[in-house]
Image (spheres, grey):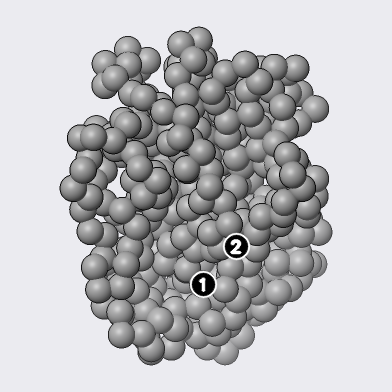
Amino acid sequence: MTDTSIPAAPKGATGILVLADGTIVWGRGFGATGSAVGEVCFNTAMTGYQEVMTDPSYAGQIVTFTFPHIGNVGTNDEDVEADSPHALGCIVREDVTEPSSFRNNKPFDQWMADNGRIGLAGVDTRALTRRIREAGAPNAVIAHDPDGRFDIDDLLAKARDWAGLEGMDLAIEVTGHQTKIWDSGIWRLGHGYAPVEDMETRPHVVAIDYGAKRNIFRNLVKAGAKVTVVSAQTSFDDIMALEPAGVFLSNGPGDPAATGEYAVPVIKKLLGKNVPIFGICLGHQMLALAAGAKTTKMFQGHRGANHPVQRHENGTVEITSMNHGFAVDSATLPDAVEETHTSLFDGSNCGISFKDKRAFGVQYHPEASPGPQDSFYLFQKFVGML
């Protein structure tokens, strides 16, 4: 998969991935037609493709699924993490088959088309994943044309001209832009997301939405909180006017340093008031920035549902869900902040806690969706602080 020359399109090819280094990957397009430019990443989860595609943290990214059978249980209106997909497209090994789940409402390829997202099937996804692991996450264009006609020079130019995720504030594009009361818990078969009756007696959490997954709010409700969601640029005064018992900082896409331009000053003021704070993923990174630490762009990122993380306090290993391309530089953490969790894959920071304040964060996703639920205790810890 190197770029010595532009290969001729193989027979039946209706989709293409053009990397910024000139590498061409042919396949069979599905979903929407057209093209999209972004960063190519890979996700190792065996389940939850619909949750992955709708996770706002994937804004600006094209997801390569390493599990070969994607789309086999179709789609439904419950297994989504946002109103619409945020990943630009996906790359899969096998063609999308007819749905085989009683919960299916729409085949995956039709769902992709209806939501304007491009798919590419018939790709050696393991080879592409190895390429990303060895050379880093590339900028690329994914395109689909039923007639197999592509202007490769134009697609290559778009891939090379795209600025990339570093320095990009995407949270402002995916935040909800409105205040919302969240009143439902986690999903149960036959019940769906049933509303909770005792909201007014619960401690009030204001959740800042930088691109949040819905199941984070549901897990906060499950842990015993009342949740009000506010948009990413909500001011300190407007947050405090809601009289929060605690503030939650959500996950989200893009460069934390860019989002931090407006988010970090608010977080610093919240820390100054010693308001209990819990951050996940991007929220964790911005909590670290507010403490004076730095973040860095990762070579390939962490995306999957089987990432081992060690909890420092007792050595417990949690199997976690992750989705991030930036990380907190643990060497820059100030003395007032301790590292609480570490990735056993590469030693990167996965958790922090303030020594003199009621604030902590984790890099991974304790709500899973998809993935293991080893880390639900973090929601209980946060609500227990309120």
Which dot marks residue 304? Answer: none
Please give left or right for residue 268 compared with residue 79 in the image: right
Q: Residue at x 51, y 67 (%)?
A: 90
Q: Quadrant of residue 318?
A: bottom right
Residue 268, position as x, y percentages in the image: 52, 14
Residue 371, position as x, y percentages in the image: 54, 63
Q: Residue at x 60, y 62 (%)?
A: 305
Q: Residue at x 36, y 50 (%)?
A: 222
Quadrant where the C terminus lies? top left
Numbered marks: total: 2
Marks 1 and 2 close (CB-CB < 8 Å):
yes
Q: Amino acid at mark 2?
A: Ala
User: Where does label 2 land, which residue?
Assistant: 305
Please give left or right for residue 329 compared with residue 139 in the image: right
Which element carries disc 2, helix, strand or loop? Answer: strand
Q: Residue at x 43, y 62 (%)?
A: 51
Choose between 314 and 163: the one closer to the eye: 314
Residue 273, position as x, y percentages in the image: 46, 11
Choose between 376 and 345: the one closer to the eye: 376
